[in-house]
Amino acid sequence: MISVQLILLIIFGLAAIWFGWRVFMTSSMVRSALSLLGSMVAIGILFIIMEAEFLGVLQIMMMGTEMSIMAIFMMMYMMDPGGLGQMDMYHQKNISIAAGVIVTVLIVGAAFATDWGTIATQFPGPHEQNRLLGMEILKRSMMIFETAGVTILTGMIASIAVALSIKNSVEK
Amino acid sequence: MTPFLNGFIITLLFLSGVYAAAVMERWSVTGHVNWGGPVRSFLLLFAREEIKTRKHDKVFFETAPILFIGVILLTISILPFAPGSVIIDLGTGALFINAALVYVMVALLMMGWAINGVYAMIGGWRAIAQLIAYSMPVVMVLTATVMRAESMFLTDIVESQKGLWNILYQPVGFILFYISALAIAFLPPFDLPTAGGELAGGVWADLTGARKLLFRLGRLTLVFTVSAAVVVLYLGGWMGPWLPDFVWTFLKTLLVAASFFAVGRFMPRIRHDHLLEYNWKYGVPLALYNIFQVGVVLLL
Amino acid sequence: MELLITALIIAAVLFGIGLYGALSQTNLVMIMMGIELMLGASMINLVAFWRYLHPEAFSIQMFVLIAMTVMALEGAVGFAIATQRFRTSGSVEMEESAELKG
């Protein structure tokens, strides 16, 4: 039984995997940042295919900003000229490949071995989803969401504190 | 009137709106109204030889103009012109506007990078700083309009303004969205990525021929799109007496676009550090205040 | 069923690629990219579980929001560390920070 949803899932899943693979295969820093952006956008489209419209649009929006920032930081710290960089920056390559393959095989095995029970067919529409998600956030999971807010504040303060340049007044 | 005829008329109105935006853009630079000018520059760019810079990044060089115009067409496709005639009515339309406009920045970054020239690259990085800064207040003031409509459907947001337009209900949000729309469309007071005087054209400096044409056309469509977004979110969309509904949307959109270009004609270009400073220090807190004010008014 | 399994396989492969990248790269920013890929894969899993197993449980969607928060925070703090690292030693290569071993 092949449905449109399955075909779209496979197409965009392959796109996500291909872009994700390109991240570590290109020799240009900006290209790998934008490949990661492509992978993240494909993940967002996967969310939309799986009917989680709000999360998909949010993912596409947030990653656009985040990966552009990543591109500018790559450029600042690596300084490769446009599409000319030739680098080989790997260590423990064989162990990494082994770890990646083993973990993938384990997860796929677990996915096949588990009995998933019945698959749900009824789900709320996008507008209803937005309402229910808001209710969830503002009622039952209020505390957790507030914690996320406080964590963001902590992260902002921490990153500014770490990135400040401390002038040593002794050496003048 | 059948829906098909309606759609045809709306498409014609849209194309003529983009043409009017082109005429107004010329006026904002030169001060003369020249009705035939856009046709002439279209033909010129169409027929001109394409010069490519040495060692450009081939992938980005080809994809960036298409991404630029593609995301703008996606944005226009979710904006409602009349009650029945919206191409895709998304359940998260208000968020989608910002999500699509973020990719304008990505396209500019890709182009600035791909050209492999100094001016273009500085223009690309400037575009990142400017558009990240100004998409923050955009998403916050959008939240305030969504709070009033209690729905993210853009048609519901227009319907919620039946009694009182949002421009009077949340004036702070309107001003912030207006300025941010200018900055997102990188129009003259905020045209730092493509600054004529200091960067010699910035991101577009080394482009000729069809790619430049795509970028110019995309920018005009972008101006028309953000004007339509201002109308839908703050000026009551299709509401108005006597005339048919889509005519009202069109007239309001043209008026907003004209005001954009008038601001560009009479304002000097803002300095880059001022641009970021004003936004992060005053724009974002004001947007938060706007959310607070709308929340209080809604609860009363 | 095959929809759920497909989504899980996609997520598993992305997670493997992310793990490979995070372990094998020597550059701090590239390591962060690997971690982002792994988080993205876990988000696919969460959305697939929400859609195909428990469409009524919205705490799963909220969990995805928390994962996005973690991604953004990881980016911010990671870039701050990279900035400080670049300022003190002039590079963000992790092979060159062996002095942190103490």
Image: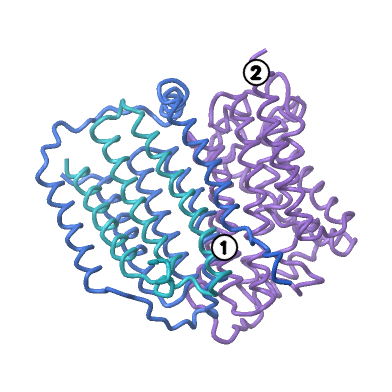
Chain colours: A blue, B purple, C cyan
Horizontal and vertical percent position of residue B52: 59, 83
Residue position for label 1? B107
Q: Name the element at disc 2.
A: helix
Q: Seen in the image, is A124 located left or right of residue C10?
A: right
* Position of residue A13 measured from the top left corner of the image (x, y, whole percent): 30, 55
Residue occupying the point 48% across, 52% down:
A63
Q: Secondary structure at mark 1?
A: helix
Q: Nearer the viewer, residue A31 or B151?
A: A31
Check if mark 1's residue and mark 2's residue have beta carbons within 8 Å: no
Circle 2 chain: B
Would you say residue B233 is visible in this rendering? yes
**Does residue B154 appear to the left or right of A21 in the view shown?**
right
- Looking at the image, which is closer to me, A58 or C66? C66
Residue ID at (57%, 27%): B156
Chain of residue at mark 1: B
Q: Position of residue B20 (x, y in %)?
A: 76, 53
Residue at figure coordinates x 30%, y 40% from the top left: C46
Question: Tag 1: residue type?
Answer: Ala
Location of the N terminus of chain C (image quadrant): top left
Q: Which residue is mark 2?
A: B298
User: Is B138 situated above or below B36?
Assistant: above
Few, some or many residues within 10 Å of mark 1 (<14, 14–19, 20+): many
Frontmost residue, A137 versus B232: A137
Q: Position of residue B96 (x, y in %)?
A: 53, 43
User: Does residue B65 appear in the picture of this structure?
Assistant: no
Instruction: Name the amino acid, label 2.
Output: Leu
